[in-house]
């Protein structure tokens, strides 16, 4: 099977614009949460788009386009892609899609009647709009579609991209996830589920955690057939060693309490990578700060990695960014790869009161160097889980 | 607000303002300019039709689309029907 390289990364997050910004600010202990939410306050669409482009894209698509632009520039594609358009794809995950567009148009429907609903409503709110917009802007004519698996969507999209390259459907794929759901309906709906924090604090794995903080943003990475990337002289940032995905098939929102299916996804990803548990140097946890996720995930990590789980650092990006839902898996893939490349483990911020049941090294509050035994590249796991019981796990290796 | 006699200047202003909102370059918006040259496509025209219906009570049907090539074509059509 073909190896898949990562040659570019882009991110728009509550910590600011840029993939590098995400990891640097997180490692420095910065938190992108304000008043109980994590908006992308630094993002101005007109920094990236013409007025026309901006009004033709829901906010989630804007985030995706901006992240893709950064990733393409890093991959060295700014002056044109190195493969035929038909051989390049774009697979973008999202939890909800253009919900701001949907809500605005529903308001128009109620207040002004059906004849005033915008012609742009459907093309802006559809869940595949992000993938389609990126494809249109960069003339990507290969496999292009959206992926929908709630908060695992970003990781599932990356998994689909990796398989598309390995199977020969494409030479390169832009993939990741995007979400912009800081809207009245989404806010109320998550609160009704008792999923979000009532005190407005993201503190994964802390005994006092009480729910997640809603965030927004996007992560997009450029994946290429490793041999083709080398042949064109690209700088290789990392390798996707493995991918595993499963479903709890258990409950609409709650994870399986024993974490068995999440562990199975981790085990499958390790098997795909042909690595044993002790080859893993770091785990970027899904770590949402909900009571249920963090307990089940801890069990899953222990089950998949065995005793080795106690020997490695594990941290949650969501402690700094909040939960980016369908974009989470993508920005966390970016954060994981930068952790492995820089060998700096950013911490789980806000973790002050250890939970007795959660007895792994969650790197509370302060960054530390990543220790990698011997003379080999660092290898890490990124976990993503979603409502519906979706589990998607990536194994990444720094180049 | 639909009116039975709307002067051309008013129609022109609504059309020009709408096109600017859609992202057309303001200095390029002229009666003789084609929609194609302004990068105004079928989705924009559909939105413009909604605005015209709301302001002047004039319906632009999809069968009209073929006759509408320039900004002036729309202004004339609305003036003729309002």
Image (cartoon, rainbow, N blue to C red):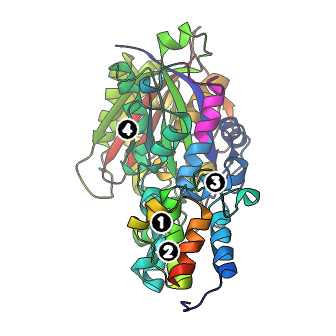
The residue sitting at the right extreme is B27
Distance CA(mark 2)–CA(mark 4): 44 Å
Q: Is residue A71 inside the magenta stretch?
A: yes
Which of discs 2 and 4 lies nearer the camera? The answer is 2
Q: Nearer the viewer, residue A88 or B39?
A: B39
* Residue that appears at 55% across and 20% down: A238
* Residue that appears at 49% across and 81% down: B58
Which residue in the protein does label 1 denote? B46
Disc 1 is placed on an element classified as: helix
Which residue in the protein does label 4 denote? A392
Q: Is residue A153 above or below residue A291?
A: above
Which numbered circle lies on residue A378? none
* Residue that appears at 65% across and 35% down: A70
Q: Position of residue A215 (x, y in %)?
A: 57, 56
Q: Position of residue A199 (x, y in %)?
A: 58, 68
Same subunit, labels 3 and 2: the answer reads yes
Q: Earlier in the sequence, mark 3 or mark 2?
A: 3
What span is in magenta? A67-82
Which image quadrant: the C terminus of chain A?
top right
Marks 1 and 2: in contact by CB < 8 Å? yes
Q: Is residue A30 above or below residue B58?
A: above
Q: Is residue A20 left or right of residue A189?
A: right
The chain identifier of the residue carrying mark 3 reads B
Q: Nearer the viewer, residue A81 or A61?
A: A81
């Amino acid at each position: 099977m073909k190896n898949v390289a990562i040659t570019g990364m882009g991110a728009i997050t509550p910590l600011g614009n840029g993939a590098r910004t995400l990891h640097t600010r997180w490692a420095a202990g910065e938190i992108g949460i304000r008043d109980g939410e994590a908006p992308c306050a630094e993002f101005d669409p007109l920094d990236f788009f013409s007025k026309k482009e901006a009004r033709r894209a829901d906010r989630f698509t804007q985030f995706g386009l901006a992240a893709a632009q950064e990733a393409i520039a890093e991959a060295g594609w700014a002056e044109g892609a190195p493969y035929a358009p038909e051989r390049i794809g774009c697979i973008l995950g999202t939890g909800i899609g253009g919900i701001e567009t949907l809500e605005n148009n529903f308001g128009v429907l109620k207040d002004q009647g059906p004849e005033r609903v915008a012609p742009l409503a459907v093309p802006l709110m559809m869940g595949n709009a992000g993938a389609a917009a990126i494809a249109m802007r960069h003339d990507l004519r290969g496999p292009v579609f959206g992926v929908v698996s709630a908060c695992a969507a970003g990781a599932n999209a990356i998994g689909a991209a990796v398989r598309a390259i390995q199977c020969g459907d494409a030479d390169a794929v832009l993939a990741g996830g995007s979400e912009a759901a800081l809207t009245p309906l989404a806010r109320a709906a998550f609160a009704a589920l008792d999923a979000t924090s009532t005190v407005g604090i993201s503190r994964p794995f802390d005994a006092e955690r009480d729910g997640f903080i809603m965030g927004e943003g996007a992560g997009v990475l450029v994946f290429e057939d490793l041999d083709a990337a080398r042949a064109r002289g690209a700088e290789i940032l990392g390798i996707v060693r493995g991918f595993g995905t499963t479903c709890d098939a258990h409950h609409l929102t709650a994870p399986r309490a024993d974490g068995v299916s999440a562990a199975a996804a981790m085990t499958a990803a390790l098997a795909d990578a042909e690595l044993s548990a002790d080859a893993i140097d770091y785990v970027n946890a899904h770590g949402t700060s909900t009571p249920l996720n963090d307990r089940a995930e801890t069990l899953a990590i222990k089950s998949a990695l065995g005793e080795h789980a106690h020997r490695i650092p594990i941290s949650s990006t969501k402690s700094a960014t909040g939960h980016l839902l369908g974009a989470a898996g993508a920005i966390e893939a970016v954060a994981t790869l930068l952790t492995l490349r820089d060998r700096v483990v950013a911490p789980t911020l806000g973790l002050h009161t250890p939970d007795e049941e959660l007895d792994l090294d969650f790197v509370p509050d302060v960054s530390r160097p990543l220790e990698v035994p011997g003379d080999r590249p660092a290898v890490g796991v990124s976990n993503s889980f979603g409502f519906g019981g979706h589990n998607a796990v990536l194994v990444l290796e720094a180049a | 607000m639909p009116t039975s006699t709307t002067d051309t200047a008013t129609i022109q202003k609504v059309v020009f303002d709408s096109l600017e909102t859609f992202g057309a370059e303001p200095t390029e918006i002229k009666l003789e300019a084609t929609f194609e040259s302004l990068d105004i496509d079928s989705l924009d025209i559909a939105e413009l039709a909604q605005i015209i219906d709301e302001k002047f009570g004039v319906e632009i049907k999809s069968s009209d689309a073929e006759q509408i090539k320039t900004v002036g074509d729309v202004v004339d059509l609305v003036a003729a029907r309002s």
